[in-house]
Each structure stands twice: as C-alpha cells, then as structure tokens.
C-alpha cells in the first residue's frame, strides 16, 4: 500500500517539472526564440539534429533499442568523414540548425571523431556529445577541452544507476569504473558533463544516490528518465507503479536537498498519477488552483517538427523513440533532404493534429497532457486522434461519454 | 563602417530563418541576446563571410535583385549592419 505522502511528493515532482518549462526571467536565446513562435508552430526546417555518427558500439547494453539485433551494430554503412563534413555544412549553412547532438553507437569508436567535432565547432554550432564514457583517453579529453565551448557544449554520459552493481548488470563488467574515470578526467579539464540515467528495475533501489555521486564527481547536471520498454526482452527492466512512485518521492526529496544540481526528471507523468485515486485527487486540486490553457505538449518531434534524428546509414526520423521502418521519413543517401522534409506529413505517425478534433478533447485532464504523444496513439489505435497507449484513463473517459 | 568594411558573424552567433513566419533570428550564445529580422535581412547577413567587403556584397546582391539600385540596397543594409555591430552580433574589420 502506497503512503499518501509518497504520492504527494511524486505529484510535486510532476508539478515542479511543469514549472521548469513555464515562462521565467533570464531566458537563454534559444528559449527566447522558442517562446517567440506560435504554439504548435510547425517549423520550416528542423532546428535540432541528432546525428548518429556510427552504428558501432563497444558495449552490448541489455536495455539498448538494438539488443538482440547484432547486425544493427555493423558500421559498414556509416558515413565517411567527407560525407559527415558535407552533412554538417548542409545542416548549418542551409538549414541553419541551432544545436547538433553527436551520438552513436559509441561515437568515440570513430577514429575521426575529434575532426568531426572540430568541423562542427568551426561553424560555432552548439554541440551535445553522447557517449558511454568507456573508451575516451586523456588525449581525447585534452583535445575536447581545446575545441569545446563550455557555455554551449556539453558531454552527456550514460550511467545506469548510482553504483557499480546496477550499472554493470546492464552494461557489462568493468563499465562503471571506466565511465567514472572518464567523468573525473572530463571534469579535471573543466568540461561540462551531464549524467543521463534511467529508472529501471536494476537502478531503482538506490537511484537517489546519483545526487551524492554527482557531488563527488563535481557534476552539476543530471537527467533521470523512466526506462521506456520497447522490446519484449526488456520487460524485466520495467518498474511497477508503486516503485515508480516511491522512487519519484526519493528523487524529489534529493532534488530539494541539492538545489545546486540542475536535475531534470521524467520519472512520473500524468498517466501514472491517473491510475491512483489519490493521484487523481491531487490532479483535480491542482487544476482547480492553476487553471491551464489547452495547448499541445512541447514535444520537439511530434508537435513542433523541430527535431530530426539521422541514423548512421542516413535514415531520417522525427523521433528517437519511434525508429522503425514505418516511421522512417526517407534516406539521405537516396533522396534529397528537402524532398524528404516536404513529404514528412505523409507519414501517418507525424500528422499535424488539431486538438479540437481529438477523441478526448473534453477530458478535464487534457490541459495537463495536451492529448499526449500522437505517435503512441497511432501505434496503439491506428489514429493520432486517440489518446496515447500510456493513458489508462482514456478507456474510463470513453465509457463515461457513452453513458 | 563604410563600403570597404569586411563583416563577419561574431563567434557563437547562429542564424535561423523561419520561412513560414518570414522571421530571421540571430542567436548570440555569449550573452543570450536574440535579434529578429525578416527575409531581406537574412539575405544580406547570409552573405557576410569575413572575406568580402560591404561593396562586394551589395554588388553581388544586385545581380540577384536587379529591381533595386546599389544606393537603395546599401542604404538599407548599412542600417542593419550598424545595429548588429552595436549589439555585437557581427564583427567589422577595416584592415582588409
């Protein structure tokens, strides 16, 4: 039986995360730009790109999207150095993108990865580099310290849990020590680091200790998301609703104790709270006290079309969560980018949705969820106008409508 | 600033054109300032390469937009350049 106090602080974590995206002073230029756009605005061209520079990876993590598909890690179809340089030139000079994420696979497996970073920085492009942190050498890190600009660039390091046991149970023996060593070196050279972690059954027991770990490593940015089960083999990593609530409670407490650590969490969402009578009560009180305007969620991919993912072999996706044959918009090696972009709305997952026509348009919670992820709704019901698969309240709502 | 001045975008400044809104954004990551203009400003700012002086840039623009005279383009562009230079979005170099 969940204590009310746990549900309350889990709810507070949900409410606090909403506040983070509300207008405030001291906005960055990117935030100012985003706020100047009309709500639900569909961009001329994407402004954020995630580029997988290689399919290859030195680890075989149990929770990887591609686990169980060894052929996917084959780097034979990776772009050449020249092709990547040309692609970056196109993204910056023609599309005027504002941010580039370089990821993989494990990007540091590419011998030319430093040159790729260098090339992107000659264009002053803000960079996010995502790595598992197991193969970087001090030489790599020294080079990065000379190339990167701490105000706009950041290195994201994946850490699955706050201890060796949790992390290594997913990523393999020895991975934790290597990653910690890399983080220490990155911080030694004053490089900005964000630790990215997931809440899963292996990390749940002491995930809150990540805050102490961040402190000891002098890292002040932390991102914790709930693990998204997208594969049968991953089901054992799923976390029950009770455990999710309890973890959210512990994380919320730690966040209050450690305001110097900028922590972003996606542990608890409205669909979790709607499954509990106490959660529903708290949501009702919240809506009464804070009347919300109805608008779509600020998803970079589905609603605003301002982010794309380019796979190592050149496939383009709007969303990294939905990377499959039927969500692929086209391949850059075969089709011109502008043609792919113009035709993106023909993909059923990523149609522009009108909130006044969705099935749950009169649901009282819609201002809080913005009708959720249309791609998830399409996958579950074959129609973006339905609620997303995660919304268990939808069926109850429809029953209510039908009397 | 005159016709011989060479201009370039300051470091850590990025361009973004939203064609659907006819709005051009310059984002300065050093001081988090944002500047907005229209498609015409995008056309001229896009030509700043740190090599060509303003005179060359205007002459190249005339080739594409022959309905405007040199003076018309120069007088419009110089106002934008001066504002952007004051706000530290672009750097000028008179030595080239």
Image (spheres, rainbow, N blue to C red):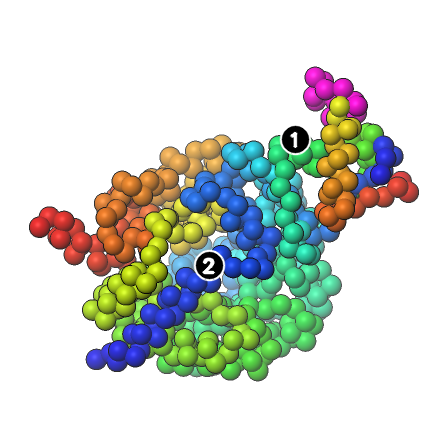
- Residue B59 visible in the picture: yes
Q: Main structural element of the magenta stretch: helix, strand or loop?
A: helix
Query: What residue occupies the far front of the structure in this picture?
Result: A289
**Which residue was labeled with disc 1?**
B40
Count of numbered circles on the image = 2
Answer with the quarter of the image where residue B8 lies: top right
Check disc 1 and report its element: helix, strand or loop.
helix
Q: Is residue B17 left or right of residue A60?
A: right
Q: Is residue A41 left or right of residue A354?
A: right
Q: Is residue B70 shown in magenta?
A: yes
Residue name at image x 59 percent, y 49 percent: A98
Residue name at image x 62 percent, y 41 percent: B36
Chain at numbered mark 1: B
Query: What residue occupies the far right of the structure in this picture?
Result: B95
Percent of width and height locating residue A317: 45, 46
Q: Nearer the viewer, residue A270 or A291?
A: A291
Magenta region = B58-71
Q: Is residue A172 left or right of residue A103?
A: left
Percent of width and height locating residue A44: 51, 37
Q: Are marks 1 and 2 in contact (CB under 8 Å)?
A: no
How busy is the neighbourhood of tag 2: few (under 14 within 10 Å), some, or many (20 plus)? Answer: few
**Which residue was labeled with disc 2?**
A21
Residue name at image x 33 percent, y 40 percent: A354
Percent of width and height locating residue A88: 62, 46
* Cα gap from disc 1 to disc 2, whole angstroms: 33 Å
Q: Is residue A67 shown in magenta?
A: no
Percent of width and height locating residue A196: 49, 68
Residue name at image x 39 percent, y 70 percent: A13
Check disc 2 and report its element: helix, strand or loop.
loop
């Amino acid at each position: 039986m969940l204590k009310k106090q746990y549900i309350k602080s889990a709810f507070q974590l949900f409410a606090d995360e909403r506040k983070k995206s509300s207008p405030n002073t001291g906005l960055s230029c990117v935030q100012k730009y985003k706020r100047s756009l009309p709500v639900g605005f569909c961009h001329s061209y994407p402004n954020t790109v995630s580029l997988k520079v290689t399919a290859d990876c030195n680890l075989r993590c149990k929770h990887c999207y591609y686990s169980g598909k060894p052929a996917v890690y084959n780097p034979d179809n990776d772009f050449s150095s020249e092709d990547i340089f040309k692609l970056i030139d196109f993204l910056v000079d023609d599309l005027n993108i504002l941010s580039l994420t370089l990821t993989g696979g494990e990007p540091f497996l590419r011998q030319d990865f430093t040159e790729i970073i260098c090339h992107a920085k000659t264009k002053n492009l803000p960079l996010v580099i995502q790595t598992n942190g197991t193969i970087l050498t001090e030489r790599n890190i020294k080079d990065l310290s000379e190339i990167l600009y701490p105000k706009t660039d950041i290195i994201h390091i994946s850490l699955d849990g706050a201890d060796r046991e949790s992390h290594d149970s997913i990523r393999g023996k020895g991975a934790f020590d290597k990653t910690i060593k890399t983080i220490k070196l990155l911080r030694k050279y004053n490089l900005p680091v964000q630790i990215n972690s997931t809440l899963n059954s292996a990390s749940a027991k002491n995930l809150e200790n990540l805050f102490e770990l961040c402190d000891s490593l002098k890292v002040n940015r932390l991102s914790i998301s709930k693990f998204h089960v997208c594969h049968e083999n991953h089901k054992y990593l799923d976390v029950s609703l009770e455990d999710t609530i309890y973890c959210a409670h512990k994380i919320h407490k730690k966040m209050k104790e450690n305001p110097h650590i900028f922590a972003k969490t996606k542990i608890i969402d409205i669909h979790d709270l709607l499954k509990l009578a106490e959660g529903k009560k708290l949501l009702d009180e919240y809506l009464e006290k804070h009347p919300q305007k109805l608008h779509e969620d600020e998803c970079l991919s589905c609603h605003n079309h301002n982010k794309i993912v380019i796979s190592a072999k050149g496939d383009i996706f709007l969303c990294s969560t939905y990377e499959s044959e039927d969500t692929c918009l086209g391949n850059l090696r075969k089709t011109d980018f502008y043609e792919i972009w113009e035709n993106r709305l023909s993909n059923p997952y990523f149609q522009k949705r009108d909130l006044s026509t969705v099935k749950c348009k009169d649901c009282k919670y819609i201002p809080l969820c913005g009708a959720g992820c249309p791609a998830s709704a399409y996958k579950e019901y074959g129609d973006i106008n339905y609620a997303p698969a995660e919304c268990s309240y939808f069926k109850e709502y429809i029953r209510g409508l039908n009397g | 600033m005159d016709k011989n001045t060479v201009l370039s975008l300051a470091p850590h400044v990025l361009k973004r054109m939203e064609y659907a809104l006819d709005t051009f954004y310059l984002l300065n990551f050093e001081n988090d300032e944002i500047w907005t203009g229209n498609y015409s400003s995008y056309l001229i700012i896009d030509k700043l390469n740190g090599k060509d002086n303003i005179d060359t840039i205007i002459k190249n623009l005339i080739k594409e937009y022959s309905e405007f005279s040199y003076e018309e383009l120069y007088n419009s562009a110089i106002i934008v350049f001066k504002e952007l230079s004051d706000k530290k979005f672009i750097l000028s170099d008179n030595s080239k």
